[in-house]
Image (cartoon, rainbow, N blue to C red):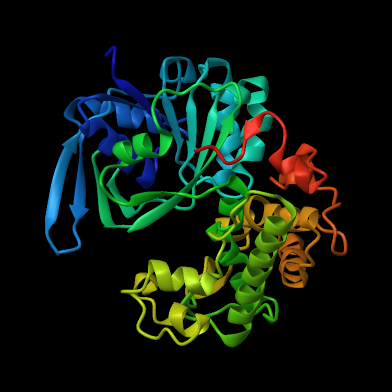
């Protein structure tokens, strides 16, 4: 295997299957998988000899089947990590820490660690848990998964329903990290031709672009006035948007854009232009899926990509549904999403009444205290990825120290 690029995929879900399989197709890549959840590694490894199929639905309506096989699937980081060049973390944000801690002793110098996607606070957590080793690594954060995909049969068949056209990625490079291959181009090679990887200038911009801003405002707007009575059907999530939910989402997005603009004024050399309003993001990314582009509410209600997607609900008895506040739309997108964004806004001196209102209601449903009034001083801040948790108490702390924030 010497001379090959060694790529490790962390996770066992639909995205991890896609990445591990696509990487393995390249003859000069050794593709490994580390999955630490339950018995996933054993189940996948049992099928490894026969490989698995990626079924790709192309834009022109044609379907292609790709037969592929990673070289190793294991739950043991001691077997998976040594000698790896690129580590792709393709698990939910709440599981990132478990993987960082398990892999840290075995990560070599000059390793590239990729969050696919990273979600808000990815770099803060990675730097904290890897310690000095982080200075000799580079962290890459992608804004979302590259594909719409679903797992048909675990370890045997995954389906790619569509590719994003472009995908933003930021780099945070340790000053002691010496890489010989260009990161963006190498990452593009691992993923394949689509989507086109676009270099976002800095990691704070991509943090403020994270799509975790979408779910909490909609949950708050939908359920804050709920009378507690069960519903007879699951309501539509995106396509059920009303004016109040759209106002909350737009307001939170406005505050992220305002934070980006404030940072750009205060920190010389930063380009925060990638931080755009969520309505503009929808028009960019789903232009061919949306039939009514008149405003944010109508764009989401008429987005074909969202057909049939419903609120996370629990069935308490046959045909009786109540909202599930433990689902990732709240449990992940608040502590590893909008709370880190609020933390960055706080450091930038930007007022965030919409974020404050949404976080205050969400933390109540999560039985947590992140925000006290309009400040991130709650007793449960330790359970978030806000910069303040890691000792970043001034705006300049985000852009100084042992890392190149805008590496080329």
Task: Name the residue at 41% across, 69% down.
Answer: 284
Screen quadrant of the N terminus: top left
Residue 31's quadrant in the figure? top left
Q: Is residue 285 left or right of residue 383?
A: left
> 234 or 207, which lies in front?
207
Total marks shown come to 0
Query: Does 341 appear above or below 225?
Result: above
Task: Name the residue at 53% across, 30% down.
Answer: 138
Report x, y in % for residue 303: 38, 76
Query: Does 299 appear above or below 163?
Result: below
Task: Name the residue at 56% across, 55% down.
Answer: 328
Q: Is residue 161 left or right of residue 93?
A: left
Report x, y in % for residue 234: 48, 75
> 135 or 352, which lies in front?
135
> 199 or 340, which lies in front?
199
Report x, y in % for residue 219: 61, 70
The answer to whether residue 68 is seen in the rendering is yes
């Amino acid at each position: 295997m010497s001379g090959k690029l060694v790529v490790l995929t962390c996770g066992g879900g639909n995205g991890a299957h896609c990445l591990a399989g696509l990487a393995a197709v390249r003859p000069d890549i050794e593709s490994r998988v580390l999955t630490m959840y339950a018995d996933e590694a054993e189940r996948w490894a049992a099928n490894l000899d026969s490989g698995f199929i990626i079924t790709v639905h192309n834009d022109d309506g044609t379907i292609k089947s790709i037969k592929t096989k990673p070289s190793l699937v294991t739950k043991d980081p001691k077997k998976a990590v040594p000698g790896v060049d690129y580590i792709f973390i393709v698990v939910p944000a709440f599981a990132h820490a478990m993987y960082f801690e398990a892999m840290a002793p075995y990560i070599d110098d000059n390793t590239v660690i990729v969050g696919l996607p990273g979600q808000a606070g990815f770099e803060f957590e990675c730097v904290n848990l890897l310690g000095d080793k982080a200075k000799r690594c580079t962290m890459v954060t992608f804004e979302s998964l590259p594909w719409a995909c679903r797992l048909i049969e675990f370890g045997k068949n995954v389906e790619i329903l569509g590719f994003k056209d472009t995908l933003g990625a930021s780099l945070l490079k340790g000053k002691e990290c010496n890489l010989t291959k260009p990161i963006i181009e190498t990452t593009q090679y691992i993923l394949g031709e689509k989507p086109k990887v676009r270099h976002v200038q800095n990691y704070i911009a991509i943090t403020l672009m994270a799509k975790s801003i979408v779910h909490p405002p909609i949950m708050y707007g939908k359920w804050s006035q709920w009378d507690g009575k069960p519903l007879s059907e699951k309501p539509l999530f995106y396509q059920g948007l009303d004016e109040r939910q759209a106002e909350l989402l737009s307001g939170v997005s406005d505050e992220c854009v305002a934070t980006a603009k404030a940072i750009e004024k205060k920190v010389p050399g930063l380009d925060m232009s990638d931080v755009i309003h969520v309505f503009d993001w929808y028009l960019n990314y789903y232009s061919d899926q949306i039939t009514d582009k008149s405003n944010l509410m109508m764009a989401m209600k008429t987005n074909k990509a969202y057909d049939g997607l419903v609120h996370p609900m629990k069935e308490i008895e046959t045909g009786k549904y109540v909202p599930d506040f433990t689902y990732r739309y709240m449990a992940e997108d608040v502590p590893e999403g909008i709370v880190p964004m609020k933390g960055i806004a706080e450091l930038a001196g930007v007022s965030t009444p919409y974020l404050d209102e949404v976080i205050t209601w969400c933390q109540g449903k999560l039985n947590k205290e992140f925000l006290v009034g309009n400040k991130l001083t709650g007793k449960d801040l330790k359970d978030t990825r806000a910069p303040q948790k890691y000792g970043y108490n001034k705006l300049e702390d985000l852009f100084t120290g042992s890392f190149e924030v805008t590496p080329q």
